[in-house]
Amino acid sequence: TVAINLALIAAGLKEGDEVIVPSFTYVASVAAIVTAGGVPVMVDCDAQLGLMDPKAVEAAVTEKTKFIMAVHLYGHPVDMDSINAIAKKHGLYVLEDAAEAHGATYKGRPVGSLGDMATFSFYANKVMTTGEGGIVVTNNQE
């Protein structure tokens, strides 16, 4: 939760900015948006894997949208080609919530390397654990 919160704040989330997030996710994804001052905009997920539907993401973008939070659920990566294309089209940041996707790959690339930044959780019930904590990763020098 704290890693997501810090990532949003570090990337410039302002009070009232919208963050698109899947409707099927853990409460931490949404709680971090709210505590950072953002407004979560929940979108539908596909019926097979429960991952955010890119068509629903595109339909949810408004002038207040600043981020798309792609939640890789249960080791299954989101359709990052579509999400990144939508983000590029609208000038949005992509934050990958990879709390449950340590080691997962999307088209041969590790999750956490596909958006502008990513968060991983090390809580006790995760694939890789330290008992508590998380990390924010990015390849952006700024």
Image: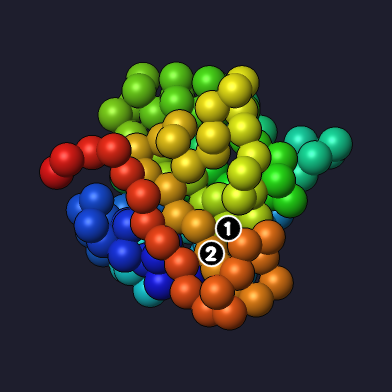
User: Which residue corresponds to mark 1?
Assistant: 99
At label 1, counting other C-alpha atoms closer than 10 Å, the crowd grade (few under 14, some 14-19, many 20 or more) is: many
Front-most of 119 and 109? 109
Residue 121 badge = 2
Residue at x 26%, y 61% (from the top left corner): 9
Identify which amino acid the numbered label 2 is placed on.
Ser
In the image, 133: left or right of 6?
right
Residue 80 lies in quadrant: top right
Q: Position of residue 120 (x, y in %)?
A: 50, 57
Q: Is residue 39 above or below residue 98?
A: below
Residue at x 32%, y 44% (from the top left corner): 138
In the image, 137: left or right of 103?
left
At label 2, counting other C-alpha atoms closer than 10 Å, the crowd grade (few under 14, some 14-19, many 20 or more) is: many
Between the C-alphas of marks 1 and 2, the distance is 4 Å
Count the marks.
2
Q: Which residue sits furthest bottom?
A: 131
Q: Position of residue 41 (x, y in %)?
A: 51, 51
Q: Is residue 98 visible?
A: yes
Identify which amino acid the numbered label 1 is placed on.
Ala
Pick whichever of labels 1 and 2 is earlier in the sequence.
1
Q: Is residue 6 above or below residue 60?
A: below
Q: Position of residue 42 (x, y in %)?
A: 58, 51
Residue at x 23%, y 38% (from the top left corner): 140
Residue 89 lies in quadrant: top left
Which of the colour schemes (rainbow, by chain, secondary structure, one colour) is used? rainbow
Q: Which residue sits furthest right?
A: 48
Numbered disc 2: secondary structure:
strand
Front-most of 58 and 81? 81
Asked whether disc 1 touches disc 2, contact meaning CB atoms under 8 Å apart, the reply is yes
Q: Is residue 16 visible?
A: no
Numbered disc 1: secondary structure:
loop
Residue at x 37%, y 56% (from the top left corner): 136
